[in-house]
Image: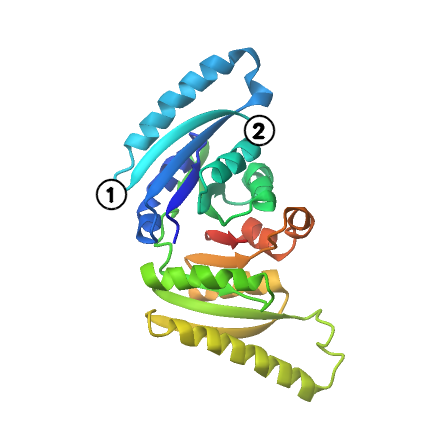
């Protein structure tokens, strides 16, 4: 499913914790991982050579710490704008996934998810996995915990039945062949939909029934392969409902579809997909 993965490294404790999770990606079909560190040209100036040499040494240390049988792991250090270099390498290598880390809530949420990760999410033309790191205070600083849950143990898949949501179907088909455990298929009927309250009750119920039937049709394709498949049709604000359901079922991963056109995505991803990434306490996979 994810044969070649680009891991964006930053040499923080969070990257080292994320490297401990590569076994789960290997379970999903990863055969090669390329660890990338970008020396930000904005800060490099005259020390570019020194920074690059230091980064190469640290990246080699990180690569040696990965111990997954059969997995090819390489590293590269580039100089430039981090988001741009991540996207460039992903295209150059024809990577099937970009793997990013993000750190919890509040200040860290704005610092990390609001910068490099945010730009990559908006401009990527391939799936992006943002693995959230829960933070807790430790001494005078912060420590990262619970980052390596079983990624595909309990997957929440959201769909709005649009052509964009259909991009998730090939991923689901790949998932059931490699690492399918429990899957919940969720459609959220937005309270703001034009017919939700404007049309008669019987018409609302008819449309809701059709959506539920679509969920069941998708579920039927998975039931023979996965341990358990659940369908849920909910009404409410999409973002808050997705997060609520994820918490209720103890989701280990949330999968959302997003627009595939870069210019449109730059303007519109700031809706459901980006908000789920920002506020989720579990990893989020955004599929183009």
Q: Please state the total of marks drawn on the protein image.
A: 2
Q: Position of residue 159 (x, y in %)?
A: 55, 66
Placement of 253 over or under 207, stated as above or below: above
Query: Dividing the picture into quarters, in which one does residue 192 lie?
Result: bottom right
Q: Tell me residue 52's x, y (percent).
A: 45, 19
* For discs 2 and 1, the disc positioned in front in the rendered view: 1
Coordinates of residue 157 in the picture (x, y in percent): 48, 64
- Residue designated by label 1: 70
Which colour style is shown? rainbow
Residue picked out by circle 2: 81
Quadrant in the rendering for residue 77:
top left
Specify whether residue 65 is in view.
yes
> Element under label 1?
loop
Residue furthest left as drawn: 69
Q: Residue at x 58, y 39 (%)?
A: 107
Which residue sits at x=51%, y=12%? 47
Q: Position of residue 180 (x, y in %)?
A: 35, 63
| Residue 250 seen in this snapshot | no
């Amino acid at each position: 499913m994810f044969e070649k993965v680009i891991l964006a490294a930053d040499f923080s404790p969070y990257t080292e914790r994320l490297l401990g999770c590569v076994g789960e990606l290997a379970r999903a079909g990863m055969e090669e991982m390329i660890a990338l560190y970008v020396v930000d040209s904005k800060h490099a100036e005259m020390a570019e050579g020194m920074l690059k040499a230091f980064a190469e040494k640290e990246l080699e240390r990180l690569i040696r710490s990965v111990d997954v049988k059969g997995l090819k792991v390489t590293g590269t250090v580039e100089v430039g704008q981090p988001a741009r270099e991540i996207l460039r390498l992903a295209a150059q290598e024809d990577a099937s996934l970009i793997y990013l880390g993000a750190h919890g809530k509040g200040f860290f949420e704005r610092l990390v998810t609001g910068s490099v990760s945010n730009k990559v999410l908006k401009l990527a033309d391939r799936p992006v996995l943002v693995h959230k790191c829960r933070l807790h205070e430790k001494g005078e600083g912060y420590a990262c915990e619970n980052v390596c849950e079983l990624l595909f143990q309990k997957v929440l898949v959201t769909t709005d039945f649009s052509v964009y949501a259909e991009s998730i179907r090939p991923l689901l088909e790949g998932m059931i062949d490699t690492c399918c455990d429990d899957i919940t298929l969720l459609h959220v009927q937005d309270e703001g939909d034009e017919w939700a309250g404007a049309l008669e009750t019987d018409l609302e119920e008819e449309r809701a029934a059709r959506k539920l039937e679509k969920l069941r049709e998708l579920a039927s394709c998975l039931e023979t392969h996965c341990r358990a498949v659940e369908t849920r049709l909910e009404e409410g604000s999409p973002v808050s409902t997705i997060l609520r359901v994820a918490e209720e079922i103890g989701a280990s991963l949330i999968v959302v579809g997003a627009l595939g056109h870069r210019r449109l995505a730059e303007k519109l991803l700031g809706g459901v997909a980006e908000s789920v990434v920002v506020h989720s306490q579990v990893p989020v996979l955004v599929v183009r």
